[in-house]
Image (cartoon, rainbow, N blue to C red):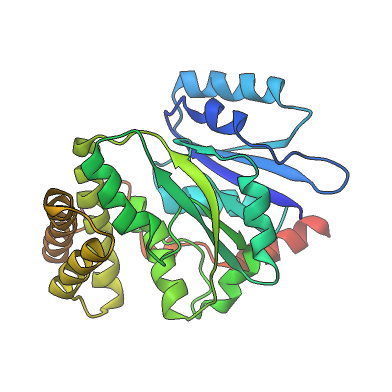
């Protein structure tokens, strides 16, 4: 399968270690393209990209894309627009790939439009590790990272836009919500991708940011918000996964912070400075029109 691997980066120098772990290379049987999308990159990241291109120029096709805002929805959309192939995998710079993980994910795709791989959290604070097992690893929602999609999936969403640009850091959760809502079949693989350490401070900050993004989406879509049901559901999953009292307590704290941030965002104007009006989210139809024009 020909594949484009979309890698967003602003300031993370762990990117080179992630790329070192990729063992699915460009060859005559299949093409492999790395689409590195730089959102206001630091000088150190710019230098690392040039170094990576020199080291791996025979193993991958490279495409480097620049965007002007630190907005993941914008980053994903621009990466999809620039990708040479319809099958696109989303991998973050704070991951490493287990041996054969990419090929295993690809083999699970078959004729479906989306595959969700397994994120493994190891070597970090146990509270974070166990909570992430509940709210990320074991969830059915196709969050980024790691997912593999066929670009045609966006035609199966009733509104046909790609990633929302108003939710900023939470555009993948917004996309996952739409996929589930449209009942698009998701294939799951146990191909493993290892996440680098996350501190408790960073983990709780993520919960708040996810909550703000969720509030932006709910305010726009006017969907029914069920914070107490979600908290109870998180507690039940924690019990099923045999989290101990402290681990489950931390998991509940995490989801409560998310719900509190969601409530705050529902009551005030959009809090993210990098948010862009939802109407500027890119439609897949516009991309196909532009590609046809380029070919002509």
Q: Quadrant of residue 225?
A: bottom left
Residue in the picture at 75% in, 27% down: 57
Q: Is residue 157 left or right of residue 35?
A: left
Q: Nearer the viewer, residue 15 or 217?
A: 15
Q: Is residue 244 visible?
A: yes
Q: Position of residue 38 (x, y in %)?
A: 51, 36
Residue in the picture at 69% in, 59% down: 107
Quarter holding the N terminus is bottom right
Q: Is residue 83 visible?
A: no
Residue in the picture at 31% in, 76% down: 221
Residue in the picture at 28% in, 60% down: 241
Outermost right residue:
28
Q: Nearer the viewer, residue 195 or 260?
A: 195
Quarter holding the C terminus is bottom right
Q: Nearer the viewer, residue 23 or 283?
A: 23
Q: Position of residue 98 (x, y in %)?
A: 57, 40
Q: Is residue 187 left or right of residue 257?
A: right
């Amino acid at each position: 399968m020909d594949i484009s691997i979309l890698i967003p980066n602003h300031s993370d120098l762990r990117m080179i270690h992630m790329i070192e772990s990729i063992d699915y290379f460009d060859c005559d049987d299949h093409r492999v393209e790395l689409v590195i999308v730089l959102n206001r990159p630091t000088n150190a990241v710019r230098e690392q990209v040039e170094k990576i291109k020199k080291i791996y120029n025979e193993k991958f096709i490279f495409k480097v894309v620049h965007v002007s805002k630190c907005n993941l929805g914008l980053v994903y959309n621009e990466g999809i627009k620039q990708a040479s192939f319809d099958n696109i995998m989303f991998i973050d710079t704070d991951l490493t790939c287990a041996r054969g993980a990419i090929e295993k994910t690809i083999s699970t795709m078959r004729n479906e439009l989306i595959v969700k791989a397994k994120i493994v959290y190891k070597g970090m604070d146990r509270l974070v590790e166990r909570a992430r097992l509940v709210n990320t690893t074991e969830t059915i929602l196709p969050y980024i990272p790691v997912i593999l999609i066929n670009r045609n999936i966006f035609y199966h969403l009733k509104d046909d836009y790609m990633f929302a640009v108003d939710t900023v850091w939470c555009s993948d959760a917004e996309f996952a919500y739409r996929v589930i809502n449209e009942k698009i079949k998701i294939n799951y693989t146990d191909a493993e991708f290892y996440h680098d350490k996350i501190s408790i401070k960073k983990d709780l900050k993520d919960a708040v940011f996810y909550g703000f993004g969720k509030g932006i989406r709910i305010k726009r879509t006017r969907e029914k918000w069920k914070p107490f049901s979600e908290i109870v559901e998180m507690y039940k999953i924690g019990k099923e996964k045999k989290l101990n009292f402290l681990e489950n307590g931390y998991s509940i704290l995490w989801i409560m912070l998310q719900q509190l941030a969601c409530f705050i965002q529902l009551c005030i104007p959009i809090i993210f400075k990098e948010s862009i009006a939802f109407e500027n989210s890119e439609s897949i139809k516009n991309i196909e029109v532009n590609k046809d024009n380029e070919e002509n």
